[in-house]
Image: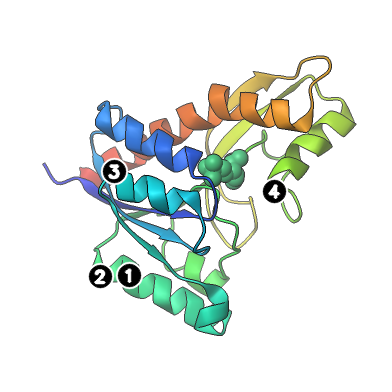
Amino acid sequence: MNKARIAVLVSGGGTNLQALIDAQNNNIINNGEIRLVISNKPEAYALKRADKANIDAICINKKECGSQEAFEKAIIAKLEAYGIDLIVLAGFMSILSEEFTSRYPKRIINIHPSLIPSFCGKGYYGLHVHEAALAKGVKVTGATVHFVNEIPDGGEIIMQKAVEVKDGDTAEALQLRVMEEAEWIILPAAVEMIAKEIAK
Ligand code: GRF
């Protein structure tokens, strides 16, 4: 069987990358294989996670590339060299241009730590998302996997999972619960679903 070739783009700790690696090892992801990890930050712990799992991992830094265009060209060159079919943004903190996203229609997915359309778009990243959810007083939040297009967090929704907000929650506590109960579950599930389509 031909497996879909997956690249995971990261910037930080890489717990979602780890969830994908674990899912691959546990046969939750069967129709795809992570072939490449790209970080835009040299210090990202996600690069170490990839190394430990024997996955090729590289850093492509925007500053070093000199421009958004050169940065994206460098990413595209690697994606092509590895014959990548599916690009997974897993905590990738750099916005990709329309030139980039339109090159891969329905082939880029992202995980966002809220129930889109709540708490998403410009400025809603990391802890800010959970701070906003707590400030609004919502009783339920969650995570969303969606296709990536030119609008930040605006592409078609693929999968969502709700998570309860508890009395006394801090943004950090809520972030962790959303990861454990939603992100680390729906990201591998969505990757397998799309990989299955690609591998057909
Ligand atoms: C996650 O909350 C993800 O939803 C968001 O960035 C965070 C990345 O965490 N887009 P990690 O690097 O996967 O641990």
* Image spot of residue 103 (x, y percent): 43, 68
Which numbered disc, 4 or 1, marks the residue that appears first in the sequence? Answer: 1
Q: Residue at x 49, y 38 (%)?
A: 15
- Note whether ligand 1 is within 8 Å of mark 1: no
- Quick check: 61 left or right of 191? right
Image-based side of 96 in relation to 139, left or right: left
- Type of the residue with mark 4: Tyr
Disc 3 residue type (three-letter): Ala
- Distance between the alpha carbons at the discs numbered 3 and 4: 27 Å
To which residue does mark 1 refer? Answer: 78
Label 1 crowding class (10 Å Cα cut-off): few <14, some 14-19, many 20+?
some
Give the image quadrant in which the ligand numbered 1 is located: top right
Is label 3's Cβ within 8 Å of ligand 1?
no
Could you tell me how many numbered marks the image carries? 4
Q: CA distance from mark 1 to mark 3?
A: 19 Å
Asked if ligand 1 lies within 8 A of label 4, the reply is yes
Cα–Cα span, label 4 and label 2:
30 Å
Dot 2 or dot 3: first in sequence order is 3
Instruction: Tell which tag, 2 or 3, sits nearer the viewer.
Output: 3
Could you tell me if the residues under marks 4 and 2 are in contact, i.e. CB atoms within 8 Å? no
- Kindly indicate whether the residue at mark 2 contacts the one at mark 1 (C-beta within 8 angstroms): yes
Say what amino acid the circle numbered 1 marks. Answer: Lys
User: Which numbered disc, 1 or 3, marks the residue that appears first in the sequence?
Assistant: 3
Q: Residues within 10 Å of mark 2 (few under 14, many from 20)?
A: few
Q: Which residue is labeled 3 in the image?
A: 53
Task: State the residue at coordinates (52%, 59%).
Answer: 43
